[in-house]
Amino acid sequence: MKTRSTYSTAFIVRSSRSKNGLLPIYCRITVNSMRAEFSIQRSVSADQWDNGKVKGTNETAKTLNAYMKEIEGRIFDYCRDMRTMNKLVTADALKNAYLGIKEDEYTLVQLFDYHNKELKETVEWGTMKNYHTTK
């Protein structure tokens, strides 16, 4: 039975981090009630912000709203790709994919090397011999 995960993106502002009357905009990714947030490196005045989007029909508002839609679309694409490849979809994984942060991948031999190096002083010689043989 395949479990269904919930996924959403939202844009929020942080009034506690305002500078010069401008509020920084953050993208919040939620997957199965777990959240990850990152700044989109854009700001907006408090009177222009309306529950997840910028009010107005001027060029600045249109550009900023389009930019947020683009971010949302790219995150959706990353989510779809992860599901297609049967990878675990988490809020942090989507955030890292968008920001270009690669997850470290290790081979089994690399993990054994790390394990043997870290436990060399704490494990008996015979046990270490078994780990080296298994590797």
Image (cartoon, grey):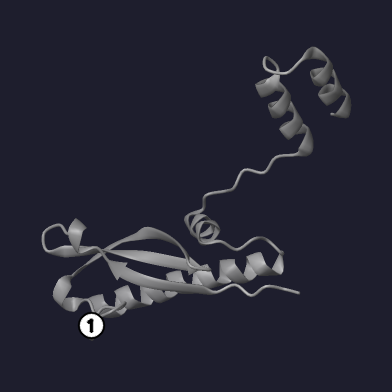
Of all residues, the one furthest to the bottom in this rendering is 57
At x 52%, y 73%, the residue is 7
Quarter holding the C terminus?
A: top right
Q: In screen coordinates, is 62 left or right of 120?
A: left
> Which quadrant does the N terminus fall into?
bottom right
Nearer-the-camera pick, 28 or 1: 1
As shown in the figure, which amino acid type bears the numbered disc 1? Lys
Q: Is 112 located above or below residue 35 in the figure? A: above
Residue at x 71%, y 64% (from the top left corner): 85
Q: Position of residue 95 (x, y in %)?
A: 48, 59
The x and y percentages for residue 107 are 75, 39
Question: Where residue 103 sits: x, y (%)?
Answer: 59, 47
Task: Using a 10 Å C-alpha cutoff, classify the residue at mark 1 as few (fewer than 14 neighbours), some (14 to 19) or many (20 or more).
Answer: some
Q: Residue at x 64, y 75 (%)?
A: 4
Q: Nearer the viewer, residue 49 or 112?
A: 112
Identify the residue under disc 1. Answer: 55
Give percent across and percent down for residue 22.
16, 64
Splitting the image into 4 quarters, where does residue 115 fall? top right
Relative to 104, 42 lies left or right: left
Is 106 left or right of 97, judged from the image as shown? right
- For mark 1, give the secondary structure: loop
- Above or below 40: residue 117: above
Which residue is outermost to the right?
133
Q: In which image quadrant can residue 120 be found?
A: top right
